[in-house]
Amino acid sequence: MSHQNPNPSLWSGRKSETIEYWHQATISVNDLKVDNNEETPKVGILGYAGEEGVKRNQGRLGTAEAPNAIRKNLGTLAFHLPEKSRIFDYGDVTTQNGDLESSHELITETVFNLLETKHFPILLGGGHDLALAHGRGVYKYLAPKNQKLGIINLDAHFDLRPTLDGKGHSGSPFLQLAQENPHAFQYLCLGIQRSVNPKSLFATADKVGAKWMVMEDFRMNNWEVIQEKILWFLDSVNKVYLTVDMDGFASAFAPGVSAPSPMGFRPEFAFKVFELLASSKKLISLDVVEMNPSFDHDQATARLAARCAEYVARKVLGKV
């Protein structure tokens, strides 16, 4: 079985008589029994405790421990979602015996079920191969509705590398999604660093019709241009799946990642992008990936990943 039930003890923090913190609003759900109460605004948390994709991509191992590290920090955050909203923790999908593909199938089905039951899914990773499974679930949900999906990736890497002997990995998810959805693939990657993306990947990005902004241009003093590019992209799609690779942040803020870089973006700038996306009311799903507790300092990266999840949920559900 590639699913582990949630550990309620991870959700702890300050005590109060009313719900004031995330740990008090979070309900642990066993056996992926998805809540189907459509009247309650809700977040569905699913961890991806897997690093087979990172291993295949020759990355630093340790990402399998990320979901619980992020949960611990999420639980202590103040709760500012609508009063009746709830957070459901559906546990972790793991990878058994290197069978990445089976764990991906379970993630895809779970994401589809979460969207069908009016959750805002927040997936915690784990390698960025998670995006293949996550994206498949969102495409499956939107297909009968004839709605266009846009994928926005805050990342230092395109993750458009070819598969290895037909097998996916943490560097290939968006090429695989492009190949599976050749007429519906809309992809915007923000924060691309030329130093870690060879010319061949820029050529691949052109081939699949991807849009991007390199790190040199992805800065606060260029906000008007960035905002225009994002708004143009938003106008071309019906719904947006946002994926945040923690290695896109400068390593001063996110040291605990698989591929750190000193030249990434700053948190306050990323959060400005989150706010713009949430204000479009098109944001349908989120994942935070490539967090690696083995290399974290004072839980800095886990805290930042938790803040990303909390901020996006608050802006999407709370409208505040």
Image (tube, rainbow, N blue to C red):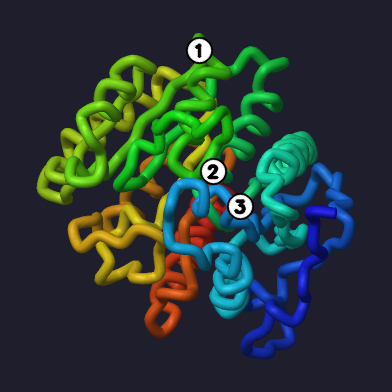
Q: Nearer the viewer, mark 1 or mark 3?
A: 1
Identify the amino acid type marked 3: Leu
Residue 224 seen anywhere in this rendered image of the structure: yes
**97 shown above or below 26:** above
In the rendered structure, which disc, 1 or 3, sits on the residue that comes first in sequence? 3
- Label 2 is placed on what type of residue? Asp
For mark 1, give the secondary structure.
Answer: loop
Of 180 and 41, nearer the camera is 180
Disc 3 designates what residue? 123
- Please tell me in which quadrant of the rendered image residue 78 appears: bottom right
- Horizontally, residue 58 falls left or right of residue 74, namely left
SS of the residue at dot 2?
A: loop
Q: Are marks 3 and 2 in contact (CB under 8 Å)?
A: no
Q: In this view of the protein, which residue sits in the foreground, 219 or 132?
A: 132
Q: Position of residue 98 (x, y in %)?
A: 67, 50
Residue 99: give x, y in percent of width and height.
71, 46
Pair 3/2: label in front = 2
Between 240 and 298, the residue placed more toward the observer is 298
Q: Residues within 10 Å of mark 1 (few under 14, many from 20)?
A: few
Cα distance, mark 3 to mark 2? Answer: 12 Å
Q: Amino acid at mark 1?
A: Pro
Q: Is residue 115 visible?
A: no
Which residue bears the numbered disc 1? 182
Q: Left or right: where does residue 144 sit relative to residue 73?
A: right
Instruction: Tell me which label, 1 or 2, sits earlier in the chain.
Output: 2
Query: In the drawing, what numbered circle is on residue 129?
Result: 2
Q: Name the quarter where the N terminus is drawn.
A: bottom right
Distance Cα–Cα, label 1 vs label 2: 19 Å
Residue 235 badge: none
| Residue 106 x, y percent position in the rendering | 76, 42
Q: Nearer the viewer, mark 1 or mark 2?
A: 2
